[in-house]
Amino acid sequence: MIIWFNGCPGAGKTSAAEVLHGLTGVHTINLEKIGRMLQRFTGVDDYQYSAIWQTIARRAPVSMARLFGHVVVDMTLLDPGVRLRTIDVIKDADEKLVEIFLHADRENLSSRIRDRGGVSVDWCLSNLERFMAYGIPACAEIVLVTDDLELKDIRTVVADACTPLLSRSGSANLAIRHSSLQESIGGLSG
């Protein structure tokens, strides 16, 4: 199974993927890092529109899910054309993919982007309006609103949303590991 955390920069995708990895040990793939590497080597401005990145975005999660059983992807993928050539292609190939869209309002997104810092702050802020204009994809199976959530709260929301998915897909080991940590997560949110 592929769990794809989607949403605007600052919505909590990477935090959600890190939380799920910490709870279950599930493998993660950061397609943004691969894209930035392609930018350096090819000079392309927005890597999501390059054929090589789209090929990697389709094949890497599928290969990892087949090898490891599960994989988590955290990647902003909102442009309907790019989405059609990546997420929708994976779904059309009968791969088990669940898209979890993390949503926050403009003020929270901007604040989180500034707070985290890094080399992509200016790019994320300058493209935020474009990303927000796409809205929430109608085909996202789960939408999690992360406005006003602290990291401890995101942990609980992600655990609650993903545990049933992993259990349904025959992932007893992941569910057991999650169950053994449920009390500590509950303690964080209280």
Image: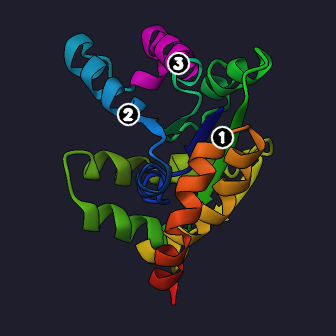
Residue for badge 2? 32
Residue in front for this viewpoint, 61 or 102? 61
Circle 3 packing at 10 Å, graded few (<14), some (14-19), many (20+), is few
Where residue 138 appears, x then y in whole percent? 80, 45
Q: Amino acid at mark 1?
A: Ser
User: Which residue appears at 48% of the width and 41% of the height?
Assistant: 26
First-in-chain label (3 vs 2): 2
Where residue 71 appears, x then y in whole percent? 53, 33
- Secondary structure, mark 2, is helix
The residues tagged by marks 2 and 1 sit, at their Cα atoms, a distance apart of 27 Å
Range shown magenta: 47-63
Judged by depth in the image, the label closer to the viewer, 2 or 1, is 1
Residue 67 is labelled as 3
Q: Amino acid at mark 3?
A: Leu
Q: Is residue 129 above or below residue 114?
A: above
The residues tagged by marks 3 and 1 sit, at their Cα atoms, a distance apart of 14 Å
Residue in front for this viewpoint, 102 or 41? 102
User: Which residue appears at 52% of the width and 25% of the height?
Assistant: 68
User: Which residue appears at 59% of the width and 63% of the height?
Assistant: 179
Where residue 13 appears, x then y in whole percent? 48, 52
Q: Amino acid at mark 2?
A: Glu
**Which corner quadrant of the image does residue 115 belong to?**
bottom left
Q: Is residue 103 visible?
A: no
- Secondary structure, mark 1, is loop
Q: How is the image coloured?
A: rainbow
Residue 171 is labelled as 1
- Residue, far bottom: 190
Q: Quadrant of the N terminus?
A: top right
